Image (cartoon, helix red, strand yellow):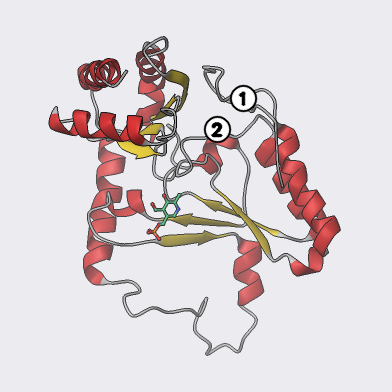
Amino acid sequence: MRHTLDIGRNAFSKGLPAHGVELADDLERLVQLHGAETIAAVIVEPMSGSAGVVLPPKGYLEKLRATADKYGILLIFDEVITGFGRLGTPFAVDYFGVLPDLVTTAKGLTNGAVPMGAVFASWKVYDGLMVGPENAIELFHGYTYSGHPVACAAGLATLEIYEEEGLLTRAAELAVYWQDALHSLAGLPAVVDIRNLGLVGAIELAPRDGAPGTRAYDIFVDCFNKGLLIRVTGDIIALSPPLIIEKDQIDTLVSTLADALKRAA
Ligand SMILES: Cc1ncc(COP(=O)(O)O)c(C=O)c1O
C-alpha cells in the first residue's frame, strides 16, 4: 500500500500527530482483499521505534483494535522498545489505553544486560490454548534456553530496581524537559523534523544529494568521538536515553548533538 499522507513528519510536532488515522484503514482493505480467515494476527509497534520513531496518529491504534475485533484477528503489540517505562508508563498499552491480545517484550526486561524475551498473553489467548488434557503442559512451547536461570535472575533484579527507583514512570517526569531540549535543535542545519514521546526522540535530517545516510552517519561518528552514543536509521537520529538520565545529562546530550549537527552541515 502506498501513502502520501503526512502524519506529522516534517511538522516539528510535539506529541501524537492529529491526522493520519486513515492509515489504519489498510487493515480493512487487506481483509477485503484476502479474507479475514487468512489473517491470524496484526503486529505493530505501538510507537514505531525501529523505523525512526514514527508516532501513531491519534486514534490509529484504537482503529486497529476495532477492526481486529470485528474480524476476529489478534492484535499484537511489539513492545520491545516501548515496554518497561520508555514512554513514561510501564507499557505502551498503558500509555495509549489500547489493549492488544499479545505483547512481546525484550530489551527492558533485563535492562538489556542478559538476553531474554517475554510474551504477555490475554486470558482469551491463554484460555484458547488451554484446551488439552489436564496433564498437558501449560501454554506449551519451549526453547533450549526458556526460563534460563541467569536471564531470570537478571530479569527479577531489573524488575526490583524498576520498582525501587520508580523507573517505569520516571520518563513521564522528564518528558516535557526532554521535548523542549530536543526541539531546541529545530533550525539547525539539515534538521527537517523532530519527534518525541516519553523518553524517545528522533531528529530527522535532509539527506545529502546522492548520498543518503551519510549525514547521519557522520554525526554518529562525531558524537561517538565526543562520548555520546546515538543510533541512526537512514538519515534519522533516534535517541532512547537511559531511564536514569538526569536533566543536566540531557543538556549535555543535546548540546553535543547540536555541535555535531553544525559540523555536518
Ligand atoms: C521493536 C523491536 N522489536 C523486536 C526486536 C527484536 O528483538 P529481539 O532481538 O529481542 O528478538 C527489536 C530489536 O531491536 C526491536 O527494536
| Residue lying at 53% horizontally and 87% vertically, measured from the top left | 136
Q: Is residue 221 left or right of residue 91?
A: left
Type of amino acid at the residue the image marks with label 1? Pro
Name which of mark 2 and mark 1 comes first in the sequence.
1
Nearest to the observer: residue 47 or residue 233? 233
Which residue appears farthest toward the front when viewing the image? Answer: 210
Identify whether 116 is placed above or below 139. Answer: above
Residue 236, image x and y in percent?
42, 32
Residue lying at 45% horizontally and 35% vertically, measured from the top left:
89
What is the quadrant of the C terminus in the image?
top left
x and y percentages locating residue 105 in the rendered image:
43, 54
Residue 115, given in percent of the width and then of the height, sits at: 28, 62
Pointer 2 and pointer 1: residues touching (CB < 8 Å)? yes
Task: Decide: is 225 above or below 126.
Answer: above
Secondary structure at numbered mark 2: loop
Q: Pointer 2: residues within 10 angstroms few (<14), some, or many (20+)?
A: many
Of residues 11 and 142, the one nearer the viewer is 11
Q: Where on the picture, by quarter, is residue 180? A: top left
In this rendering, the answer to whether 107 lies above or below 55 is below
- The numbered disc on residue 17 is 1
Q: Report x, y in % for residue 72.
A: 77, 61
Residue sitting at 36 percent across and 20 percent down? 178
Q: CA distance from mark 2 to mark 1?
A: 7 Å
Quarter where residue 237 is shown = top left
Residue at the spot x=40%, y=35% of the render?
A: 211
The kind of residue tagged 2 is Leu
Does residue 208 sit above or below 50 in this rendering?
above
Is residue 122 visible in the rendered structure shown here? yes
- Secondary structure at numbered mark 1: loop
- Residue 240: in sight, yes or no? no
- Residue 55, numbered label: 2
